[in-house]
Amino acid sequence: MKKIELKGKTILVTGAAGFIGAHLVMRLLKEEEARIVGIDDLNDYYDVELKKHRLELVADTAEKTSSAWIFEEASISDRDGLRKIFDTYDPAVVVNLAAQAGVRYSISHPDPYIETNINGFYYILEECRRSKTEGRGFEYLVYASSSSVYGDNSEIPYKVEDPVDKPVSLYAATKKSNELMAHAYSKLYGLPVCGLRFFTVYGPAGRPDMAYFGFTDKLIAGKTIDIFNYGNCKRDFTYVDDVTKGVSLVIKKAPEESEAGPAYALYNIGNSSPVDLMEFIEILGEELIKAGVLPEDFDMKAHERLLPMQPGDVPVTYADTSALQRDYGYSPSTDLRKGLSEFAGWYKRYYCK
């Protein structure tokens, strides 16, 4: 592994107004003496005001640190615009978190997944290649993949070496495509590249399309929440701070080319402790009541509806993080109740003013 020195360099974070992106930028601003450049197209897949709220949190953080923060409203699927950003800021490290997210949305709205996740990622790879070829600043690309690539693999926990050639959603297929494209560019052009498969990330200022957030919205409105596969699901829920901690470690140490292959690596970032969905919902309800989001006498069971499995979903996600532990000495470990307590507190402050 090659050490990457970040002091005084530029780190480009795409999807910087997104859930993981904003939390990562805040961590980097606190931990690194660097110039952080964030880009995001602020699309309306979900509430744009929430994305602006995250950017306000980032700006507040930046004011308290010695690192520089620059935000550009831009899309990775705009090739000319992306090239201008690379030419202007000449990033040494690129963290690509920009993507069209959502398994279920990909079934009904496939176009943005091809536009952003395939074309946009190709443009990112091309700009990194161009920077390296021209002898400019580029040193390392880290990008977000997803646990969705494992599909309905029966072998658990999921290992990065497992076959992932049978995706069950277009979203998963685009993420697997990213891994293949990145490997090809690493092999052809010597780009140091690392992919990170995230497992069900949750936490404050999260994505409204994620189950825990959607459940909260419905419960506070007195509506029924839909629980698929009759609640017989397990998820490796991973707190957002654990994810950004993992990313912050990975960007400081890059894979190197060897006889075994190109300078390319893949890691799982998950809590390695899958939780039964019904237990998750029970804890979520308790923490929402404790935070004052829901009344003390709220009856969770009366607001639950059990339904069959949805297309594109899988019954279990479970990360083997031994490779991450081996190479970076790190495994996520935040307790679920603590993480949901942080989410409930944020939700109370933001929505229940």
Image (tube, rainbow, N blue to C red):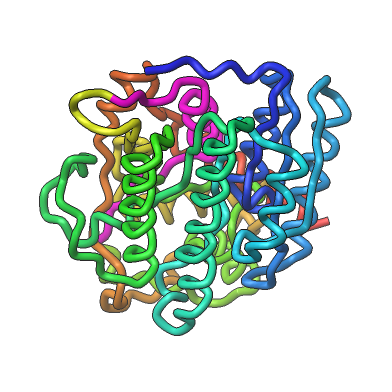
- Residue at position x 54%, y 57% in the image: 123
In front of the other: 302 or 61: 61
In front of the other: 124 or 170: 124
Q: Quadrant of the C terminus?
A: bottom right
- Residue at position x 32%, y 57% in the image: 176
Name the outermost residue toward the left.
155
Examine the rendering and report whether any part of residue 191 can be seen: yes
Q: Quadrant of the N terminus?
A: top left
Kindly indicate the quadrant of the structure image that contains residue 94.
top right
Residue 234 lies left or right of residue 109; in this view the side is: left
Please state the total of marks drawn on the protein image: 0
Place of residue 260 in the rendered image (x, y in percent of width and height, measured from the top left): 18, 28
Task: Tell whether position 246 is magenta.
Answer: yes
Place of residue 138 in the rendered image (x, y in percent of width and height, measured from the top left): 58, 33
In front of the other: 332 or 305: 332
Residue 351 lies left or right of residue 325; in this view the side is: right
Name the outermost residue toward the bottom.
108
Place of residue 228 in the rendered image (x, y in percent of width and height, measured from the top left): 33, 71
- Residue at position x 34%, y 59% in the image: 177
- Residue at position x 41%, y 29% in the image: 332
Residue 152 lies left or right of residue 244; in this view the side is: left
Q: Tell me the magenta residue range.
A: 233-257
Image height check: is 102 above or below 12?
below
Place of residue 137 in the rendered image (x, y in percent of width and height, measured from the top left): 63, 30
